Image (spheres, rainbow, N blue to C red):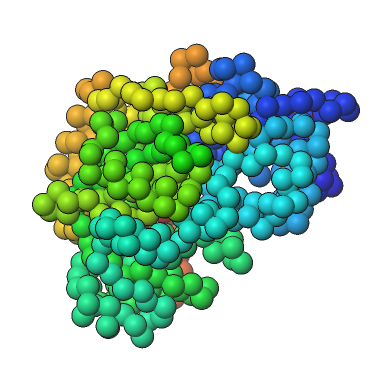
Amino acid sequence: MESNQLITRDSQPTPRPVTYDALVLDAGLPQSLMTVRSLGSRGLRVAALETFAGAPTFSSRWCQKAFVCPADVGTEEYLAYLKQVLDWTGARVLITSSDGTIAFIRRHREELEQKVRIALAREPALGIAMNKEQTQGIAKKLGVSVPRGVKVKAVDGVEAALREVGLPAVVKPVESWDEQHRTSMKSELVTTPDEARRAVEKLTRFGGATLFQQFLPGERESMGLLHANGQVYARFVQWTRRSVPPLGGTSVVHQCIAVPPDIGTQAERLVREIDLEGYCQLEFRRDATGHPYLMEINPRLNLTIENAVYAGVDFPYLLYQWASGDQINVVNTYLVGGWMRDLGGDMMATIQALQQRGRPGVNPPAKAIRDFCASFFMPMRYAYVDWKDPLPAVIATANFTRRWVARALMKRLSRLRRWLSQSLRGGDRAPAPATRRDGADQVAHTSKE
């Protein structure tokens, strides 16, 4: 199969160009599914693209064409394939939602914009938002609180950082995506000097820098904004009850709330100062007294955008309006109190809470299990589930189950190989691998992935 061959859901591409309103990249992500549902339900023609088959978005009733690129994001083959898809679809707007694809588009933006409008902020605002150090520097000038911290470029700077910040602390990459190695970099909680050194060594292994920051124990709140032409067209805020990993990870149980006056004012002032247009999400964390601190800005649709849409703030459609040059709807109100849950993610969050018992910000095991079970008795929407479009939820559940089983089997096989190796070296003296009848052992080991 040639790398530039179009692979579509109905296997045979129509030879004549067909005009689509939008092409949605990163079809494997939940926010891409929500984007397809949002635009498609409004009568727009939407196509989606991913680098693997079986993405839940492809099964949506609103996805009119599904493309599977045989090359990885960031490669020249991916660029050639994407340009071919844009030529074939005649898409008006290109929407993407991952750091890796954004980095790729930034490198090829001028070339791609000859074919399509891109639903991303312009430079230099986009570059500032992707860089935590620059973002927090501007926030400080505006009087927006940021966590106390220092920049650390290598392990030999950890000792000074520990004296300045103390423990526990959070080690963050200045930029979450390493474009050269096409690798995502995640923040890590550290509670000992050894953990701090390992985290800095890991996050700087490709030459990047980290921010060594104080740990904040309070609530995590996220504010979404659609800003253009100096005006904020829509606002939405949610707070995170549980995430995976437990500290600063992906929100898996969250509730929409009214815009708090403190972070609402700060967020809008910061976005206007940067002149960051389009959609963005601002992350805040409160300290023990309730004071908010800016953590970062994500200039793209986030994983939990589904909650905002069901509350009445259709950010994917507003983003499309902005990128296409259409008049943008103004949204002044939304429903508060609604809960959203990613069940698979919540299972992982609960397991990680059991594994990380005693660490800062992690609930005790009994509370983690109790909270997980209690959520089944609360009025709550579930990620992927839409009774008007049921197939994506079925596909997502099947994918999750398949990955879970595969990881459990790999863990078991790995333990069996180690036991056999020890047996061959030590004869009959090696003990047999333990087996738990209640299955708890499988769950515990699976969750380490």
Horizontal arrangement in the rendering, residue 126 relative to residue 295 (left or right): right
Q: Nearer the viewer, residue 426 or 96?
A: 96
Residue 439 visible from this viewpoint: no
* Residue that lies at the very extreme toward the bottom in this rendered image: 156
Residue at 35% x, 69% y is 211
Image spot of residue 371 (x, y percent): 19, 36
Q: Nearer the viewer, residue 14 or 138?
A: 138
Image spot of residue 337 (x, y percent): 25, 25
Image spot of residue 11 (x, y percent): 78, 29
The picture quadrant where one finds residue 253 is top left
Horizontal arrangement in the rendering, residue 441 relative to residue 305 (left or right): left
Q: Is residue 263 above or below residue 136?
A: above
Q: Which quadrant does the N terminus fall into?
A: top right
Residue at 23% x, 39% y is 261
Residue at 31% x, 73% y is 150
The picture quadrant where one finds residue 236 is top left
Q: How many circles with numbers are drawn on the protein?
A: 0
Image spot of residue 393 (x, y percent): 48, 26
